[in-house]
Image: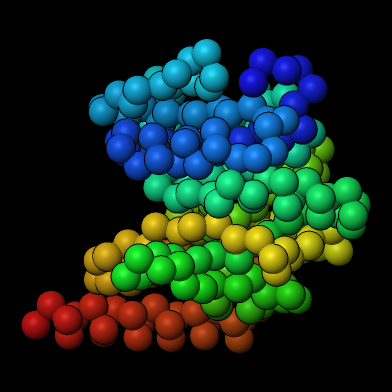
């Protein structure tokens, strides 16, 4: 892990999830591709995780700053050529990095997305399949299959984009790909159809819909000068629909 020529820097932001963080870390340590470092960025948790600092670089922030800043800090101190992001409640299958490495060598692309699976009844089922063609207006309206755990990106390209937008406290993963398209480097995106991550889907559907509303409002604020008027109207209609669904479920 102390090899200065690590190919991947695995960056895991965390906040008050020591149990799931441990499982996420183990899924990285169990990879059959070993040329990586692990960086855990703790966003000022009250619950202190148990970290093996001989194998993992651990950084604890002095104040709660949000996941975008946490990931950006991890990227700044990283030593790898490619950055692989993982959320603290998700996992990777043991061949995730090896498959990604092969695709990097084969395609020479700079940005890689993978399928998203969830566990239902002891079985893994497909949850999201990233769009092959990422269209800007559709990204504002729909979830294209992007999370904080299925993105691998060349370090130089990450900083060329500007990293994760610190003004996005939700949907920051989608925001990164939006910035990729705005900067016209989306030809560097490759979707791995034979690779996947294991996503921990939240059980509270009402909470999920509230987060959807927050994410859409956040996108409207940050990209107000980019989103076409027609798309803005569609987003407001989506927000209204989600609001009414939440209201009726409470009754």
x and y percent of residue 118 in the render? Answer: 43, 65
x and y percent of residue 146 in the render? Answer: 58, 62
| Number of numbered tags placed on the structure image | 0
x and y percent of residue 12 in the render? Answer: 51, 37
Q: Nearer the viewer, residue 135 or 108?
A: 108
- The residue shown at (35%, 70%) is 120
Check the picture and name the quadrant holding the N terminus: top right
Quadrant of res 210: bottom left
Q: Nearer the viewer, residue 170 or 16?
A: 16
- The residue shown at (17%, 81%) is 249
Check the picture and name the quadrant holding the C terminus: bottom left
Name above or below for residue 194 compared with residue 91.
below
Q: Is residue 214 left or right of residue 229?
A: left
Q: Nearer the viewer, residue 29 or 107?
A: 29
The residue positioned farthest toward the left in the image shown: 251
Name above or below for residue 186 compared with residue 18.
below
Name above or below for residue 42 compared with residue 143.
above
The image's colour scheme reads rainbow
- The residue shown at (58%, 47%) is 94
Name above or below for residue 122 compared with residue 81.
below
Q: Is residue 218 left or right of residue 19?
A: right
């Amino acid at each position: 892990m102390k090899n200065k020529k690590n190919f991947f820097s695995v960056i895991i932001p965390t906040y008050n999830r020591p149990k799931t963080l441990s499982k996420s870390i183990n899924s990285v340590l169990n990879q059959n591709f070993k040329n990586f470092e692990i960086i855990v960025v703790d966003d000022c948790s009250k619950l202190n995780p148990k970290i093996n600092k001989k194998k993992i670089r651990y950084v604890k922030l002095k104040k709660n700053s949000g996941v975008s800043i946490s990931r950006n800090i991890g990227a700044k101190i990283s030593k790898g050529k490619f950055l692989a992001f993982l959320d603290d409640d998700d996992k990777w299958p043991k061949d995730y990095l090896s498959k990604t490495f092969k695709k990097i060598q084969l395609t020479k692309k700079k940005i890689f997305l993978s399928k998203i699976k969830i566990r239902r009844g002891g079985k893994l089922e497909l949850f999201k399949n990233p769009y092959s063609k990422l269209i800007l207006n559709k990204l504002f309206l729909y979830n294209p299959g992007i999370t904080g755990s299925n993105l691998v990106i060349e370090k130089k390209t990450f900083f060329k984009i500007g990293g994760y937008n610190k003004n996005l406290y939700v949907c920051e993963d989608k925001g990164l790909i939006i910035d990729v398209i705005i900067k016209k480097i989306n030809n560097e995106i490759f979707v791995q159809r034979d690779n996947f991550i294991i996503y921990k889907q939240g059980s509270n559907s009402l909470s999920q819909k509230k987060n959807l509303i927050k994410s859409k409002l956040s996108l409207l604020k940050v990209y107000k000068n980019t989103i076409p008027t027609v798309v803005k109207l569609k987003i407001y209609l989506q927000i209204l629909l989600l609001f009414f669904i939440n209201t009726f479920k409470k009754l």
